[in-house]
Image (spheres, rainbow, N blue to C red):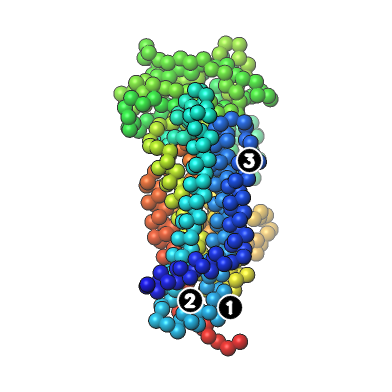
Amino acid sequence: MSPIWAIAVQAMRSAIRSKLVVLLLGCLFVSLIGLPLTIRGDGTLAGHVYILLRYSLGLATLILSLATLWASCAAVASDIRDRQIQMVVSKPVRPMQLWLGKWLGLVLLNGALLFVCFTASYAAVRWITHPERLTPVEQAQVEEDILVAQRRVAPRERDVSAAVQAEYQAGRARGEWPAEVATRDILPVLERRVRAQANAVHPGDANRWVFDVPRLPDSGQPLRLRYRANSSGLDLTPVRAVWRVGAPDRVDRQETSVEIVPRTWHTLTIPSDLLGPDRTLTIELASAPGTRATLLFDPSEDLRLMIEQGHFLTNYLRAALLILFHLAFLAAIGLTCGTLFSIPVATLVGMYVLLLLNVGRFIGQLAAWEVHVAQTPDAGWFMWAVAHVTRAIYWGLNLILQPVIAENPLAFVAAGEWLGWGTVGATLGVKVGVYVTVIMGLGAWHLSRKEVALPS
């Protein structure tokens, strides 16, 4: 047996013997069984499946992340503390082999645990969606909206720059904007306001959106528009409206009368033959006569044209791979922290990195701000320096974190949205191929220079 595999087996045994890891793994299996039984969701079949896929597996992923960080931080640090590493370094084992063996053992252990978690959840989903347990309507919902892998297509973005500038100039003329407020701070607010108005459906009016549809895997398959809207009303009273699908000059436009419950997802089935010759789809929503409420849409989130791309199971497996790559990344961070620090400090640093990964998008927003510390004309050089140092810190953190921050794959699977192999390959190349390699090099280099046999 090669040294790397021998060290990997020993690392798995050490992780399993850890009392804290065993406790976390106990919580893992309790979450897989207990959470679906205690949280009922909205009482629908889709809500039950969503809880199983998003929250039950999400909690399992969080527990695995914590267990991975603890086990990886202790993998090297405990060997150094207990002087067991002296038995390894006295043999012809290089630091790189030691680090790689520990990391490989933790990744294999995580892979086995993920397999158990995802298999149990998949079996539960299949059990509650078995045809014998469902009505014909629920069975159709499972096949069309739940156990699917669909690509989301957003409508074309409207060019509102001219309207934003006109609104800005009008506001300046009316004295709405204080002179001390910079233009760059006003324009984003105005753009959100103008976009909201441009995508609203007022009483007695209509609005239109255009989708650029990619090539369909099956030319005859129907499309599905998933949509939700906010209402100007204060309650959830349904709003009557009419969907018109197809170019305005087509005689075979599809018209569907609907009652839209605010803040609730709805689905509209669209025949693929309503696509234009340039593979565009035009949809229009008109307010029904007598309607008094205004419907408000965020087109990037509230209007989703769904196109079937593959099977649910392969999508599910891609999500499992993405989570495994994330756990491998955390194991690398924990191992290198364990070579640099003692167990308590290494664990604290690892948890801090996990926190940064979870708030990475907010850090990206902070990095885009030009002002982080309020300054006055008489603030002086100190406040100027604090502002620029703060911005540099956020900018640096964002530069490091952005390549490894991604959407939660479980959110895609639970919503029936497609995860492509391109996403899996990019995550493997960046998180494992680049970041883990760099972290491994740092850990192995420090381990090669560390004095591990000093007298106490």
* Spot occupied by residue 84 in the image (x, y as percentages of width and height): 53, 79
Q: At label 2, which amino acid type do we have?
A: His
In the image, residue 219 above or below residue 411: above
Secondary structure state at the residue bearing disc 1: helix
Front of the two marks 2 and 3: 3
Q: Quadrant of residue 36?
A: top right
Q: At label 1, which amino acid type do we have?
A: Arg
The image quadrant where one finds the N terminus is bottom left
Q: Which of 253 and 371 is in front in this view?
A: 253
Which disc is residue 446 wearing? 2
The image quadrant where one finds the C terminus is bottom right
Residue at 38 percent across and 30 percent down: it is 212
Distance (Cα) linking label 2 and label 1: 16 Å
Which disc is residue 81 wearing? 1
Distance (Cα) linking label 1 and label 3: 43 Å
Secondary structure state at the residue bearing disc 3: helix
Q: Which of 456 and 203 is in front in this view?
A: 456
Secondary structure state at the residue bearing disc 2: helix
In the image, residue 103 above or below residue 221: below
